[in-house]
Image: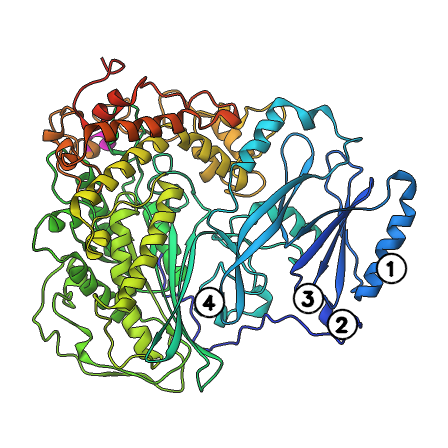
Amino acid sequence: MLGAHLLFSPIAMPLRVASPKPREEEAPPDGEIEHQTLEKFQLYETRQRFYLIGSDKSKKYWRVLKIDRSEPFELNMSEDPVAYTQQERNDLLQRIADGNRATGGLNFVTKAFGIAGCVKFLGSYYLILITKRRQVGTICDHAIYGIEESQILTIPHSTVQTEAANSKAELRYKKLLSSVDLTKDFFFSCTYPMMQSLQRNMLVDEAERMPYENMFVWNSFLTRAIRQTLNNCRWIVALIHGSFEQVKMSIFGRVFAITLIARRSRHFAGTRYLKRGVNDKGRVANDVETEQIITKEESPVSKWEVASVVQMRGSIPLFWSQEASRLSPKPDIILQRYDPTYQSTRSHFEDLEKRYGNPIIVLNLIKKVEKRPREMMLRREFEIAVDYLNKILPEASRLQFIHWDFHKFAKSKSANVLAVLGGVASQALDRTGFYCSGKPYVVKSHLHQRNAVSSTSMKSGEVERVSEDGPQNKDKEVNSKEARYQSGVLRTNCIDCLDRTNVAQYAYGLAALGLQLFALGLSDVVKVEPESSIAGALMDMYQNMGDALALQYGGSAAHNTVFPERHGKWRAATQSQEFLKSIKRYYSNTYTDGEKQDAMNLFLGYFQPQESKPALWELDSDYYLHVGSNGDDSHASDAWYLQMASTENDSWYGCGLLPGSVEDSEANKHYAQFCEVTNLDPFNPALEENEGCMYFSADDIRDRDDASVILEMQSALNEYQDIGKDLGNITSRSNYEDSDTLTHCILGKERTALER
């Protein structure tokens, strides 16, 4: 049951993550050894061992990690308890070199900036090192880095490796692991817990400052063996996947930084059509936490003052799916399972309450009415689920559900999408608040502007307009000596939680930005004008974030028409770009998502290879890898094998699939009410309701030259024909022999020979 438990404490604790500062050429006191932060590393090797030498940022003291290379299958490592000065380190390396002179001596391998993980497939253990980094920003003086290069090293010496280390399956697993590109959208910090919000970091006990089991740490599995062996996190870094961008700006000479962070959850992670909805544990696909931080630098009160606000996105928490099809770029939406008590949906919202507190505000942007029922089925079922849960939950824990048909409103030429969404955002912020490190300010009643959402509409779930003067609320005063905290969160979704969701999240970020700047004394008003340069910079940041998340989940940059039109771009050019994004997303979903999903399952530890068991690429489904009784721990693969052993032929991996074999079952009756519609032709665009920015018909690109479209399609076709060759994949070969046929198929102009 959802309770009133809040994640946020009313007592602020300082974040202490600075490294100790020993005297020159002296080892630090014994009491400080366990709190050392290592940032720079050098790897050396002998025939018997790897020696990883780590130092603090200033290189004043050094630690040594020894990794045994004589065992072909086991991982044996130990940490020298001594903290060395630089001279002592040099002497130690010389002694090691002298002692191994007969077997090749001591050789330098590479510089590094931390261990990203350690993993084993069927043969030897591998060590994953970050060998080159770039600083992308700072948070409260803590450096944040992106990865420029990484390296995978085989730990056992070649003389002790077995045949399994060079088997075809082992090499394929290694290539799959390597296909997870750490140089794209992975970030880390040696001293700042990036997996947690700024508010959480200011409140957390220092002993929990780097929680590697956090849902946003993508190398949690890869570092688990090291953490358990050494009982510390000194040698590893926590990788966050998503997006990070920081921009410095000024208002009349007052300098501040805007930081936008997107943290993608490792739970139920995957690609667009292979991960939809919710799983049995209440974890949803494409679960992303977005944090917007404003830092006022060199303030009179302290070196910096900060304000932070958090929102999140995630797939609709129901059991539903879409199967990628080579015949249609818009597969049907299938409600897979009937859950009369909505237990998994409830588990999801319970988790949100534990993470963020109350209230949980749900902004649902999918379609309400369609000629061919697709999104409207989910919309109706989602509304039923929320209504059911609100009847059994305590009043304080009830969900505040808002449904707004984004596409229907956006079709109007006079529509101001951002204005309406900005009204929703203002009301949500009024309920949840945001974190501020402590600055006096008074929020006037003009916070509620025209087109804002009325206080009652948040409960009723409908977006309404209020008078230009807004509700007559009294001024809200905040104690100038106390920090303020966020409790609750705005949860936004559309179908993919990419395109429409990103526009809504920008509107929320813009409304929050005005409050944050005002709270820090950087602005005299609580609203940032949409046409201002600051709003334009924030829009660019949200667009960049949306593109990054869309590439990770959907295979192409984010679709949108709102952002380009706000920048004054030509509508025909925007439509052309959106069409090509649709083509790329279609190709990715159809031909490459399977390999990407396999790589993620391997990287995250959801699948762990075992001898005499089916290989990862031989599985029909990865469903039980993500919902087995042990989840993402070391026995996830065992759970899957046990579940498959008991699966019956007429069920959906052990659970009744809708529609099932019994036509008059309650589940089928429930599902049938959404499907009572004539089976329309999926290739006839006249029968489909316009998807707005999602897909375009031939009329939408009539201003483009047909020849140029064919050429671009041919280029895309050639690119995707080659995908997967390095992995030995033969499924990426297209069924369309020429780009002209494929183009016409996607535009709905003609059927393919394959379809006939």
The CA distance from mark 2 to mark 1 is 18 Å
Task: Provide the secondary structure element on which disc 3 rests.
Answer: loop
Badge 1: residue crowd in 10 Å (few <14, some 14–19, many ≥20): few
Badge 2: residue crowd in 10 Å (few <14, some 14–19, many ≥20): many
Which mark, by number, is residue 91?
1
* Residue highlighted by disc 4: 200
Up-down: is 276 above or below 647? below
Task: Provide the secondary structure element on which disc 2 rests.
Answer: loop
| Amino acid residing under circle 2 | Pro
The CA distance from mark 3 to mark 1 is 22 Å
Q: Is residue 373 visible?
A: no
Q: Nearer the viewer, residue 261 or 371?
A: 261
Task: Provide the secondary structure element on which disc 1 rests.
Answer: helix
Ranked by sequence position, the earlier of labels 3 and 1 is: 3
What is the magenta range? Answer: 665-669
- Point out the image quarter for the C terminus: top left
Disc 2 and disc 1 in contact, CB within 8 angstroms: no
Mainly helix, strand or loop, the magenta region? Answer: helix
Assess whether residue 344 is covered by the magenta stretch.
no
Query: Is 13 left, or right, of 506 in this rendering?
Result: right
Residue at 75% x, 62% y is 62
The CA distance from mark 2 to mark 3 is 9 Å
Ranked by sequence position, the earlier of labels 2 and 3 is: 2
The quarter of the picture where residue 327 lies is: top left
Disc 2 and disc 3 in contact, CB within 8 angstroms: yes
* Residue highlighted by disc 2: 28
| Amino acid residing under circle 3 | Gln
Ranked by sequence position, the earlier of labels 4 and 3 is: 3
* Residue highlighted by disc 3: 36
